[in-house]
Amino acid sequence: MTETRQNTQQPADTGLEDEPSQHDEELRYSFPGDNRRTAGSSISTRAMVRRLPQLLRRALALAWHADRRSTLLLLLAQAASGVFGALALYATTGTLAALLRPGPVSGHLRDAAAPLAVLTVSAALRSALGIAVMTLSGRVGPRVNRDADLALIEAGCSAELAAYDEPAYNERWESADRGAATTPDLLTAAQDVIASTVSLIAAAGVLATLHPALLPFLVLGSIPAGLAAVRSARIHYLATVTTNEERAALRIYRWYLIDKQRADQVRSDQVLPFMMAKYRAAEARIVAVTDKAGTDAARVSLFAALATGAGAALMWGALLYLVSTGHIGLAAAGAATFALRTAAGGVQGMVGNGTRLYRMGLFLDDYFSFLDEAGGHRITRGTIEPPAPKLIEVTGLTYSYPGEQQAPALRGIDLTLRQDEVVAVLGQNGSGKSTLLKLLSGIYLPQPGGGQITWDGVPIEDLDAQAMWSMVARVPQEFARWPLQAAENVHLGHHDGDPDQAVKDAAGLTGFDEAVHRLRSGWRTLLAQGWQGGAELSGGGWQRAAVARAFYRTHREPGLLILDEPTSDLDPRAEHKILHALRDLAKGRITLLVTHNLGNAKLADRIIVVDQGLIVQAGTWDQLADQPDGLFKELLDLQQDRTVPAQRTSTE
Ligand SMILES: Nc1ncnc2c1ncn2[C@@H]1O[C@H](COP(=O)(O)OP(=O)(O)OP(=O)(O)O)[C@@H](O)[C@H]1O
């Protein structure tokens, strides 16, 4: 009841629905950057026509890579079908010529028998080959799609993390994803273009033998339609690219509205009407751009249709002229009419499918350019495979996230970390702690001119990324809740044999084992409620799993242990357990701990306090607590001050 009232009241309450421009502003704010620089948006019409052969080659290459045998058979079937199509056409003209020739009918029928037999056999074989082509396409298409999908995921995961901070990257991903989805259709369109071309060539061959004067008219008639189709394809493509921001926004809004993690807040905060107004505003802009593109394309098609009609009139006029002046006989004219109809079908097919192919090809360009450079951010680092670091040195580290509004997250940090040392990183929200940890673990790289981080003297850019990360065990601030079994959520596939004992040991250190014992299928329980047989953990249960994951990695000897607020969701018992385990695990490693609980920082050998991207204090807990003017002391006093406004008495 309340929900209904909210929904019906919303437009009147907010008036947002009537103000799409306000939402446009917000969308641009959310997705800044040049989103028009996707691969195909600058291509001219002439270049587009020239690109069709290249697209055909690409479609075939994709198919070849996905399934060689089927692709080869497909090409053979397609070619044979074309040959039989041409034969059928020649046989048709032969049949017509025999039937329309002057003389007794019985003789006509006898003469027509042979071409008629060829016609029947060719048509039957063509139908059979058509079925073969369809079956083979059905095999190749999904395989092409599978390959494209896998390649895209691999390319996305091989980009530097910093790529995600750039808005243009998301857009490129969006276009590339669409390109990957079009790959099976691309193959079908490529085949249809080939088939139409073959039938056009056959028809043109027949016409040329009947009377060469008919050929130029055929070409003339097809040019306007071809140009118009290519231009429309470009109009539609640009419309799609222009609305990339809105499409990305819709995808994100939709995800936020339907995702389980926020489903409670969607309801309790009654945010649906507000978000739907934004959603509708984005939709409205897409519809407006698409409508305009539709009108523009229709205008182009209208001109093309008029030009094609004029061309066709000329062609039929020429045919009439040739017949009336006796340049060709009536039988040949009948055959020419048939060939012209076939040729027109071929032109239509070529233009229509060529346009489809071209449109898909534009998205495919985005897909390939994304693959080529992983959106411009492929991980290209050194090849040195480091052992566990004994000494990490940071000099003059400055780091800025993209965007004009952003102040540098880190400013000239100097820091030395040694094996066996536990260093706590403290500071207020947004001071740069997580950014520093991401840089130390090589998830981000220092920016050019932004200082240096070395592991045992080697700049981290020179280290092999995978080898480096294999030395790191992290609990990130926002940890993943993998839709995997409980045990898998700890080992994540990193095990040489039976991972059971190591998983249980790591889980025992964090209390995750207690959460697992309460699950019906124990370690085999799928932690994904909403999936068949899935279960859900509490917030703290998930954090215990995340810490167990990092502790499990220490069994495989990562030398750098990084914990970003690892106990923020935990009860005191679990927190106590983890902090105790941490002291033992820290031996022989470099350990970094971010925490807002200053009491927890007591376990650290050294504390650094970060403020607005600078290290403003460093020392032991006692040393910092003795500095009355320091930020540490201020935060400590605030944390210990639990005076709350006095309770009101009943007489107040
Ligand atoms: N991916 C990002 N893109 C842009 N800016 C970012 C990004 N991540 C962090 N920032 C900005 O960088 C600054 C430092 O953020 P960081 O997350 O390192 O702070 P923090 O000290 O870990 O904060 P908290 O205690 O709230 O977790 C902040 O101003 C933040 O807004």
Image (tube, rainbow, N blue to C red):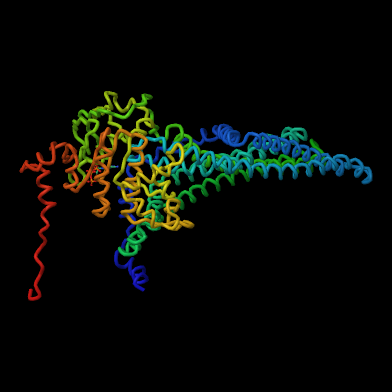
User: Measuring 73% from the left and 39% from the top, which residue is drawn there?
Assistant: 81
291 is higher (above) or lower (below) than 188: below
635 is higher (above) or lower (below) than 618: below
Taking the image as drawn, is residue 491 in sight? yes
Residue 340 lies left or right of residue 385; in this view the side is right
Q: Position of residue 137 (x, y in %)?
A: 64, 42
Q: Nearer the viewer, residue 345 or 574?
A: 574
> Which residue is farthest bottom?
651
Q: Quadrant of residue 277?
A: bottom left
Residue 62 lies left or right of residue 108; in this view the side is left
Q: Position of residue 292 (x, y in %)?
A: 45, 51
Residue 89 lies left or right of residue 161; in this view the side is right
Q: Quadrant of the C terminus?
A: bottom left
Ligand 1 occupies quarter: top left
Q: Nearer the viewer, residue 360 or 392?
A: 392
Taking the image as drawn, is residue 224 in sight? no
Q: Position of residue 205 (x, y in %)?
A: 73, 34
Q: Position of residue 352 (x, y in %)?
A: 60, 44
Q: How many marks?
A: 0
Residue 332 lies left or right of residue 159; in this view the side is right
> Which residue is farthest left?
628
Q: Quadrant of the N terminus?
A: bottom left
User: Measuring 36% from the left and 44% from the top, which residue is drawn there?
Assistant: 505
Q: Nearer the viewer, residue 25 or 386?
A: 386
